[in-house]
Image: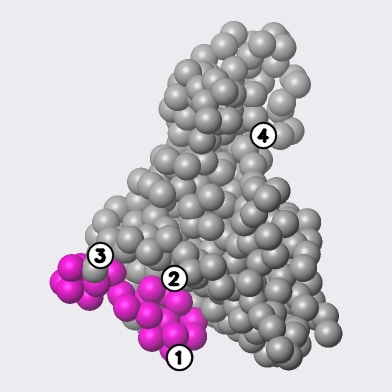
Amino acid sequence: MQKEGIIIKGIGGFYYVEAADEIYECKARGIFRKSGVKPLAGDRVLISINDNAENTIEKIYDRKNALERPPVANVDKLFIVSSVCEPKPVLLIIDRLTALATVKNIEPIVIFTKNDLDDASEFISIYKKAGIKAYSVSCVNGDGVELVKNELEGCISAFCGNTGVGKSSLLNAIDPSLTLKTGEISDKLGRGRHTTRHSEMIKVDGGYVADTPGFSSFDTEENEIILKDDLPYAFKEFEDFIGECKFTSCLHVKDKGCRIIQAVEDGEIPATRHESYCTMMEEAKNIKEWELRKK
């Protein structure tokens, strides 16, 4: 008998597939190993259910996208979590992650936590102006939590952000049955940095959330690179102005006749976003395609 399902966890060569509201333990067929394809959490698959032998993954359907670390596929939304204070937001890190999500065909959503301690409206306006959904929440009084919860329905989502910004607290506020450890507790127990590299899909409010140990902004930055030719398209607010510069070789950093720089000066593009773009472009100019192939 064969069924279609989704891989919710892979560990030790075994894959756990949810199909028709049941979980099946499966092994991947050797053909995947030979072709260099590794099944990932989030993969849509066809499995064979066998009475007297191991269940097997027969087919992995085409992926919408895949992340290297955390190893997860078909992510619809990346929730980039930052606190409005303690620690303060680092906009460059947020902008790197929104750009990486965009090039991976993942919708970036920016969440500012701890709005009971400080006002997040200045940061919210930056991302809304850039055409990116942004929310301000408090896990203490529940403000904004329902809005984030609504974004999860019917999607595969991943949450990222540095220790202490409130990722676990936010997920616990969305679904108290999760009882995830908070970063503060993990640090005290010496478990602030996970070494586990597998991912697991958790059902949350009509969707799946990738429980990805060790997934911080730095994990993603180290393993995902955007080439300079692709970088302008990773900033969606640039779209209306690309192609309108005086020179076709324009990098949109300090070039003469640059339409994007003009849009920044006119207030059409947030200045902080362009600053992040310039930093990333300086880095991207030194990266060659062969370096990507080596990874």
Name the N-terminal-most of marks 1 and 3.
1
- In the picture of the structure, the residue carrying the numbered disc 4 is 233
> Mark 3: which secondary structure?
loop
Label 3 CA crowd tier, 10 Å (few <14, some 14–19, many 20+): some
Which residue type carries mark 4? Tyr
Name the N-terminal-most of marks 4 and 3.
3
Q: Is residue 270 left or right of residue 176?
A: right
Q: Work out how far the residue at label 1 is from the one at label 4, CA to CA, in angstroms.
A: 39 Å
Q: Is residue 248 visible?
A: yes
Displayed quadrant of residue 6: bottom right
Q: Which residues are magenta?
A: 168-190
Residue mark closest to the camera, 1 vs 3: 3
Q: Is residue 167 left or right of residue 227?
A: left
> Mark 4: which secondary structure?
helix
Residue mark closest to the camera, 1 vs 4: 1
Picture residue at 75% right of the left edge, 62% below the top: 60
Picture residue at 64% right of the left edge, 54% below the top: 33
Q: Which mark is residue 192?
A: 3
- In the picture of the structure, the residue carrying the numbered disc 2 is 137
Q: Is residue 4 magenta?
A: no
